[in-house]
Image: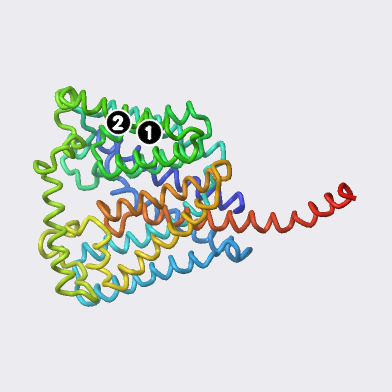
Amino acid sequence: MFSSVSRSMAHLAFLALFPGFFFYHSALGTGMIGPVLGGYFSWIALAFAPFLIGGYLFEVTRGLRYLPRFDIFFFLFLLYFLFIVAFNMAAGADQDVVKDHLLAILQFAVVFIVFKMADFRSGIVRWAAFGSLVAMTVLVFYLSVDGMFYLKQDSALSNTESLASYQGFARSYFLTALAVAAFTNSIPLRMLIYALCIPALFMNGARSELIALTVTVFLIEVFYARYRWVILVFAGVAIALCVVYFDNLIAILPNNRTLEMLDLSADASWQARNSLLLNGLRTIADHPLLGDYGSYAVLGGSGDYIHNIFSAWVDLGLPGFLYLACLMLLPMYLVCTDLAIQNRQGRSNEFVLTFALLFVTILLLLTAKNFTDVLIAAALGRYSHYCCSRSGSQVMTSRERPHEQRAIVPLSA
């Protein structure tokens, strides 16, 4: 669909931004290297930005079908976001919040283009991503302490500010796993991927990504399975085993954050997020139209935002919140419409990846992630790719139809 140069640049950027992020911070956390690239992700995004944006502009100028209206709406959202940041920066907003948001805009643009132009059907890309996934899994289990992979806590570095948290590791792991699993048609190989990824994210302790991966596995297998009841049986057996051996898991993994989900009343993270949510809702109630940009930084720090989509209301106001909600929900509605008219054999790998990404992104926006999470850009970029591939297949079908008719007429005569 896209030129080989544009696809290759998107593939390199994907591997550098996600598996590369995991490997860099693993090396940083174990003391193999120093923080030569700071937090890594923004520097790598900045390095790839000119090539990706240039490739994107080349593609959309050579064929307007590569520029669906959805792309325009997405970049208009980024322009609105940039305007809000610039206005509040001029008004003296907290500089840490401003910096975080400017980097988020850069990351959104880059990740959107990467997921729009990447071709995960490519054998080289799939095997490179699969090899990276295996290597990341090995690192998770090798570097775990008492059932928990958390280098920021266990690192020997005197200053861990540049080191990624467990959420950063989990984001890279989840997106790599999803890209591999959705394009793996072999059932045994998919089962192997699940057997690697679910325990690894469990050890990582990032509960949002673990739930997202579990939901994704269920969706992929429901879409691909011939007998869906088998999936329900396996899910039931897995849940039953966890219940039966729960005490054993606690004894083996005493410090694992994931198990704290079963007793939220004693979970400090859950209590803190509820407190942030209440503070944010009070801000929205006091400033219902325009929000109060960066107000949470005064109460705590630049990271003390609401951990769901209402964070957009606080920083971008009601218009930004509604715009983002529509940006997520309309693609989900249109993909669900396609789902309703397709049979199981008609669902492509591309459809499965797009549906799964949109579904889990909306789920996490409602429960755990704020509006600057790059998962949003990944999901919307893949939806744009899906729109382009669908319009391309329709063009091919319309071109082939006259030839089919000419071939059929002599036979009927």
Residue position for label 1? 232
Left or right: 242, with 389 as reference point? left
Q: What residue type is labelled 1?
A: Leu
Q: Where is residue 257 in the image (x, y as percent from the top left)?
A: 18, 37
Q: Position of residue 233 (x, y in %)?
A: 37, 29
Residue at the spot x=14%, y=28% of the render?
254
Q: Where is residue 130 in the image (x, y as percent from the top left)?
A: 46, 33
**Residue depicted at 35% across the width and 65% down the height:** 324
Sequence-earlier tag: 2 or 1: 2
- Quadrant assignment, res 153: top left
Q: Front-most of 210 and 345?
A: 345
Residue type, mark 2 in image:
Val
Position of residue 157 in the picture relative to residue 383 (left or right): left
The image position of residue 149, as x and y in percent, is: 24, 33
Q: Nearer the viewer, residue 42 or 359?
A: 359
| Element marked by disc 2 | helix
Instruction: Determine which of the numbered discs, if any, sits on residue 385 in the image.
Output: none
- Say which of marks 2 and 1 sits in front: 1
Neighbours of disc 1 within 10 Å: few (<14), some (14-19), many (20+): few
Query: In terms of secondary structure, where does tag 1 sit?
Result: helix
Which residue position is annotated with label 2?
Answer: 140
Label 2 and label 1: CA atoms lie apart by 29 Å
